[in-house]
Image (cartoon, rainbow, N blue to C red):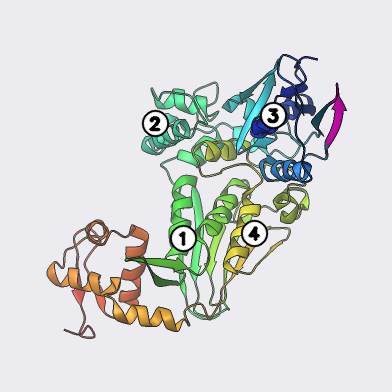
Amino acid sequence: MKETEVLELKKSLTQLKEGIISLSAMLNKHNKGQVIFGINDDGKVCGLTIGKKTKATITQEIQNHLKPFPINITVEDYMQDDHQLIRMKAAGDDTPYCAYGRYYIRVNDSDIQMDSYQLQSFFENKDESYSKWENTETDYTSADIDEDLLLDCIRTANEKGRLNYVYRNADEALEKLGLLTSSGKLNNAGWYLFGKGKPLTIKEANYPTDARTEFGEIKEFHGNIIECIHEALSYIQNHISYKSEIVGITREETPEIPIKAIREIVINSFAHCSYAKVGDYNQYVIYKSSIRIYNPGSIIKGIDPLRFASGQVGSKIRNVLIAATLYKYGLIDTFGTGFDRTFTLCAQAGVEYKYKEDEFGFSFIFLRNTSFLNDRLNDRINDRIKTLDNTIISAIKENKYITTAELVKLTGKSSSTINRHIKSLSEDGKISRIGSKKAGYWELTSTVEE
């Protein structure tokens, strides 16, 4: 017996991870494959010691790390030459399959990590792909993109092992990502991802009640996809509630909704948005009892997100090039697992959610816990220590021209946290801004105690 493109041999179960990687590579190449444990790669049978839970452990590892879960998979033990062996067999055509967050292809008897072009071709060959719009040529060139964002994308992709390319110039990098046409123009995907002409509009709103009838903050933001992702995440983070607790000797803030869960849904809203829809926009709306994240374009084929989360089906990509670039940029970990991570994070934090789709688009709704801040212990902690609000007020007293960047350096907090506290202090009437953002200064109001 020897290894082939559809057969992998492993000496022991200490190589289970490598075996699952091989299985994913074979599925991607031939839609089937098998891995046998207890045989050396030279074909010599050495056997295994199999316990009561061995097969269950293997099955659990496959479920956790092979996505999507193959439609046909078996884990069986059998005897050969008086030795116990275990065989993993799988079949499925919902490619590409990923193992441990990465994508592989079988070449002879080796498992090779896919390059960007191989991964892109898998998604483009899916009927669900909307790649025609993405590949449509624009009138823009590499001179019209934010090169700093592109460079950051390439560096991040290399650091994460999702690209092997040394940045030389914008044209070559864009071509590497599949974002440049043969005539040297940006395609729609490239323009929307990195264009500095603000090709995309998103809408953001914050209402004091659960109805839009009450006056609230409504704004539009214009930018490319990368800029809009950062803006949407920052907007939501700045409008949700946080409570503090002392961990050791440091003070830590806990959000009412896990930030990672919000991040998954926000990025998903850009990866699967139907950008060709005219007059509809990604929307991020904060209500008293919920947070609604909406994107034009329903889930392809109306598949319930629970099926994605359970691994029953693989990712159905609307925007192949955009999703592939977000993956390389590290904004997407693996395709089709965002709902799974979101549901798990919400369950761990006790956060309820719901989702719905209609003929216009898809909405994911996080339900807010109105009693989140009713925590007596938290109140006592806030009474005992100097709050960040007071630190900001003290800093403004000393220097009314102090900037957000300087407050970040002074407090060790993130810019989004500082902005959130400044907004709260302004709304409470404790500070006000005089003049412009760049040339203005802060003024303490009479409500601030001396």
* Disc on res. 343: 4
If you read the primary sequence from the N terminus, does the residue marked by circle 3 or circle 1 appear first? 3
Please give the name of the residue rendered at 51% of the width and 44% of the height, measured from the top-left corner.
Answer: 331
* Disc on res. 12: 3
Task: Inspect the magenta stretch and tell me whether residue 80 lies in it.
Answer: yes
If you read the primary sequence from the N terminus, does the residue marked by circle 2 or circle 4 appear first? 2
Q: Is residue 124 visible?
A: no
- Element class at badge 3: loop
Q: Position of residue 6 (x, y in %)?
A: 78, 22
The CA distance from mark 4 to mark 1 is: 29 Å
Q: Is residue 425 above or below residue 2?
A: below
The magenta segment: 76-82
The residue mark sitting in front, 4 or 1, is: 4
> Which residue has dot 2 on it?
143
Q: Position of residue 163 (x, y in %)?
A: 50, 28
Dot 2: within a 10 Å radius of its alpha carbon, few (fewer than 14), some, or many (20 or more) residues? few
At label 3, which amino acid type do we have? Answer: Ser
Q: Dominant secondary structure of the magenta stretch?
A: strand
At label 1, which amino acid type do we have? Answer: Glu
Q: Is residue 266 above or below residue 226?
A: below
Quarter of the figure with residue 127 = top right
